[in-house]
Image (tube, rainbow, N blue to C red):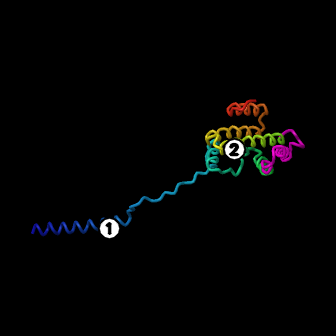
Amino acid sequence: MKKIILVAALITLLILSSIVVAKGSSTYRTTQPVIQPVEEKCEDLEILQKRIKCRLEKSSSADIPEACLDLPIQGLCQDFYDRAGYCYDLSNDEKDSCFRAESGYRTNPHGQEKRLYINALLYELEEYVEDDFEQKGLTAEEAANFITDITNMKRALLSGKPLSEIKMLLSNYAARRGIKN
């Protein structure tokens, strides 16, 4: 009798354990779920240097030029970038003439026109840094640091800071870049 009860208990135990395995196996995954990486957007980064480095590494650009971003003259600044964009494809002499015309500097070499013209020249300096990066002369970190310096110069310029301050920033940049005056 004890043997029959023991065998019955074992059979019951086996039956119950197979039900638990069956029930548990319907929700158990043998493989890990595929986690899709979240694509980092350069614009979402808070630090200017990090946004620039991100764009260099991804070969992307910003919707609004960093020099114009959140300035009181953001619209005017962005319009200038849009108008003068074709100038960068011209020869050096034609490019300078184009910058003067598109900024209004040719007809009014003072005030905001002068600042937009200088901004265009600083953008050209930025292009040289990007070229050095693309030709592997600079790391992304180095290029991002130099472009950040230039962008800060442009922001100070477009914000109406004294030209003496811009000249000081430019001298500091030249020294860091190894450019002799």
User: Which quadrant of the figure has residue 165?
Assistant: top right
The percent coordinates of residue 25 (x first, y second) are: 35, 65
Whether 99 is among the magenta residues is yes
Three-letter amino acid code at the position of disc 1: Ala
Question: Residue at the spot x=90%, y=43% of the render?
Answer: 107
The percent coordinates of residue 76 (x first, y second) are: 79, 48
The numbered disc on residue 128 is: none
What secondary structure is marked by label 1? helix
For discs 1 and 2, the disc positioned in front in the rendered view? 2
Residue wearing tag 2: 131
User: Which quadrant of the figure has residue 1?
Assistant: bottom left
- Circle 2 packing at 10 Å, graded few (<14), some (14-19), many (20+), is some
Camera-side residue of 39 and 173: 173
Q: Which residues are magenta?
A: 84-111
The percent coordinates of residue 58 (x first, y second) are: 62, 50
Q: Is residue 141 left or right of residue 128?
A: left
Question: Residue at the spot x=11%, y=67% of the render?
Answer: 3
Q: Is residue 56 left or right of residue 108?
A: left
